[in-house]
Image (spheres, grey):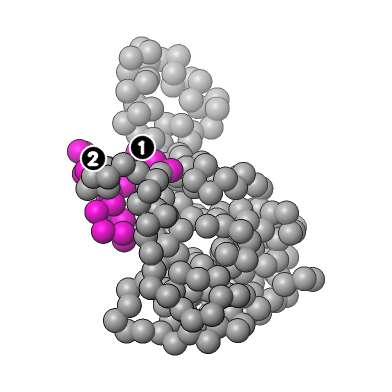
Amino acid sequence: MENANPTVARRGNGAQPNAQRKHPPNVPPSCGKPQAVSRAASSTRRAEGDAMTLPKGFSTIRAHSPGVYLDLLHPDPDLISLEDIAWSLARINRWTGHTRAYSVAEHCVYVSCIAPELLRPWALLHDAEEYATGDCSSPLKQLLRGIPDLPEDVRSELRAELSPELWHFLCAAIPGYRSIQDGWARAVSTRFGVPVERVKQWDLEALLAERRDLLGIDAPWIEDSMGYVACPVPVRPLGDPNRAERLYLRRAWELGIR
């Protein structure tokens, strides 16, 4: 399979980590000497001064870029930057940290290498919203369901018992983790012009490979009963967030994501 091994994405990288630099060199793999990161492209997407405006409310977090604040309930595509995504995902561990250091960024690169070619751009971005929401284990996601995440029959029954005003208030006040993630996924799709694709099959094949190579678990899981099989490509953690960050950025450049 072409580019099936995620390790191909980091070949030819001769840049040495710089302890004083907080960001990776912002150059594609084909370019020569690394240059300092420029945020100009991101800055031009928003009016001067807007980046320093802190939205009021409890739902606001600070992005890695200086002066950029993200409202979790109101994703703004113009505030999303590839550099912030790479920085954050490279420092978020998979499996809630209960394994060897293996980041969400590395997982996304892996999925982008095993997915069909046309799906690879979104495969790389399929967890990009976690740079704002953080990673959350699947069991916890089920426990953090909001009103919009409830099964249709439950929502219909609940809606019939409530006034329209109270129903709309509850939907807005209790959006649920998954609904917030979906909103950010749509914003990421808009920002980079990459359509949301169904990459769950390759996401789960990567998950089962991680279970095999990082956790050493052989017992059957629900994904096995659903017909998913672990990808045979070995999972090899980099063990360094700076390298994982550069790996993610290089893969994005290879796929035409800027």
Residue at which label 2 appears: 55
The reply to whether the magenta stretch includes residue 74 is yes
- By secondary structure, the bulk of the magenta-drawn segment is best described as loop
Seen from the viewer's position, the closer of residues 138 and 231 is 231
Residue 66 position, x and y percent, is 26, 59
Q: Which mark is residue 211?
A: none
Image point 37% across, 20% down: which residue?
A: 167
Q: Specify whether 220 is left or right of 131.
A: right
* Residue type, numbered disc 1: His
Q: Which residue is mark 1?
A: 74
Residue found at x 66% / y 48%: 198
The answer for how far apart the CA atoms under marks 1 and 2 are is: 10 Å
**Quadrant where the image shows the N terminus:** bottom right
Q: Is disc 1 in contact with disc 2, using a CB cutoff of under 8 Å?
A: yes
Q: Secondary structure at mark 2?
A: loop
Would you say residue 236 is visible in this rendering?
no
In this rendering, the answer to whether 208 lies above or below 242 is above
For the point 29% across and 81% down, the residue is: 20
> Label 1's element?
loop
In the image, residue 190 sits, relative to residue 243, either above or below, namely above
Q: Which residues are magenta?
A: 53-77
- Of residues 173 and 196, the one nearer the viewer is 196
Q: Is residue 22 above or below residue 165?
A: below
Residue 149 in the image: state x and y as whole percent.
Answer: 48, 36
Neighbours of disc 2 within 10 Å: few (<14), some (14-19), many (20+): few
